Every structure is written in C-alpha cells, then in structure tokens.
Amino acid sequence: MSAGSPKPPRFPLGLDSVGHGAVRSRAKPEPRAVLRPQRPLHEAARDASRQATPQGLGLDSQPVRERMIALLRREGIRCEPVFEAMRRVPRHAFVDTALANQAYEDTSLPIGLGQTISKPSVVARMIELLFDGAQARTHGSLGGTLEVGTGCGYQTALLAHLARRVVSIERLKPLFDKAGTNLSAWRLDHVRLVHGDGRLGHAPNAPYDSIIAAAGGEDVPQAWLDQLAVGGRLVAPMHRGGGRGQVLVVIDRHAHGCQRTEHEAVHFVPLKSGIA
Ligand code: SAH
C-alpha cells in the first residue's frame, strides 16, 4: 500500500525542503559503548511513570526536538541531514500517548507485540552510516531505499525526508497497519509500506541505493545483496556468532563485489522469518 492521504497533514513535513548538508565522513569509527536500541520492556514500562519531559516544553514545540538533537551531537552523531529530518518528524506522534512524555529522550519505547521503537541515537547512527556511503555522498540523498522492520513507522518518516523513494516492509500485520495509520497524517506518495517477510527484500522496486534493517539476523540475507545497487550501501545489525552479540554491519556493493565492515556493538530485536 502507499501511505498517501487526502487529509491535510497534522504536522507539515515540507518533504521537498530538507537540506542535505555535508556529512562528516569517518574512516575509522570511534569505539563506543554497546548501543541498545531495544531495551527490556519492563524497564520502558517502569520509566513511563517518570514524567521526564521538562516542564513548560510542549511536545509539539521545536525546543524538545532541539534538545534531543543536542543530546545526539554529544553522543557523537554528526549527520546534519538526519538532524534536519528529526526536527520535522514528531516522534511523540508514533508512540502511545502514555509514553509520549518520553518520546524525546534517547530511549526505546514499546510499540506493541513485544517490539520497540528504536533509540533515536541508534536510528541516527544507522542513517549516518548510510549517508557515508557512495550514493549519498555523490547525490546528497539516500536514493531508492529499502527498510526492513517498519515497526511504528518513525524511522520510515525520517527516511522519507532523506530518500527519493522508500519501500518499508513489516512482517507483523498489526504493526504494518499501525505504521500506515501513523504515516497517513502526511502525503507520502514516495513511501510504500509492504506487509511481508523482509528477509526476502522487495524485488519489484529493486535495486536499492540504500538498505537499512531494524532487526538483527544471523547473516545478511542473499536477497538484500542481490537487491543492492552497485554503489549502494546496506546497514544492518547482525550476530557475530559464538555468543558475541550483534554489531552494525555495513556492506558496500561495488562493480566487482561487496565490501563488509563492522561497527558498534548493538542489541536489536531478532530478524524473524515469515509473516504473522
Ligand atoms: N524502526 C522501527 C523499529 C521496529 S522494531 C520503529 O521505528 O518503530 C523491529 C521491527 O522489525 C519489528 O516491528 C519486527 O516485527 C520487524 N521484523 C522482524 N523481522 C522482520 C522481517 N523478517 N521482515 C519484516 N519485519 C521484520
């Protein structure tokens, strides 16, 4: 389905007006603590009662998003395009109202069915890695983008600002429906939501300049490699094997093969097979 809607947007996104400024290129990633985009649900529920949003800052106001961006800068993120997208996408609109007061903290939150919206710092870091790829460096855009694991649709909305076209796949029907509802607040004619098994990618719109996954598997599915364009980049959490946890894996596809690099340790929900 396409996430389009005849309704006027609740939150004007100005999809065409986002600047794609220079992105700092890092030859060697600095070592960081393990990124935990999906923390245990009981911790999120416990924190729901903390009322952590500063008094006097409404969730619709720009200062709460600027605070979040300032926090991400302190954590080492340097990707101006992703900050620009984060200014425009109201994260609180993608989570339950009971959790909205935590939407601009650097924390993951439950979105139902045992899944979570990823931490802003991890979302920003993964998109930053995509922006360091050849496609984005050359064209200032993520180009045609495949997202695996739509969840509530927050990252999809960010990608919509940064990519020419977004195809996002979710295997759980209730979350696929929820993302469609969340994203229908805007006219996103260049975003296509798919209910399916993202391990298979989405061949009809391939090849993709950028592929990003929000769930961690044991290996990189062959379909993703097959559907990655020459000059394109893939960013995904993957298990290292031997119980050593997950890392962010970057794969660049060149004319004569693929190059794989490993980055920060992360902790994502599992990439599962099939649909439900
Ligand atoms: N970026 C999302 C994160 C959602 S959590 C957000 O902002 O909300 C990861 C999601 O990946 C979950 O919704 C889970 O159902 C989905 N997922 C796991 N395996 C999948 C697969 N094989 N295909 C598609 N989605 C998958």
Image: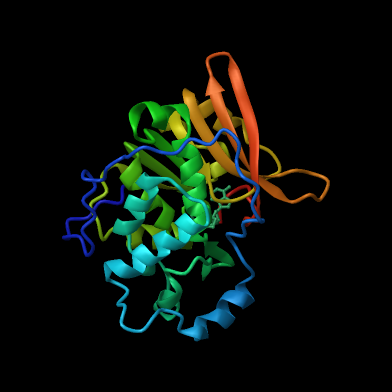
Q: Residue at x 62, y 66 (%)?
A: 39
Q: Left or right of 52: which side holds 200?
A: right
Q: Residue 11: where, in percent of width, then height?
A: 23, 62
Query: Residue at left 37%, top 46%?
Result: 80
Q: Residue furthest right?
A: 242
Q: Is residue 263 above or below residue 102?
A: above
Q: Name the image quarter holding the C terminus.
A: bottom right
Frontmost residue, 123 versus 169: 123
In the displayed orientation, state which residue is furthest to the top: 256
- The residue at the point 29 percent across, 57 percent down is 88
Q: Is residue 269 visible?
A: yes
Q: Position of residue 234 (x, y in %)?
A: 53, 35
Q: List x then y, in percent, for residue 176.
A: 44, 56
At horizontal 27% and vertical 71% (from top left) the residue drawn is 61
Give the camera-side residue of 236 and 30: 30
Q: Quadrant of residue 204?
A: top left
Where residue 143 appears, x then y in whole percent? 37, 33
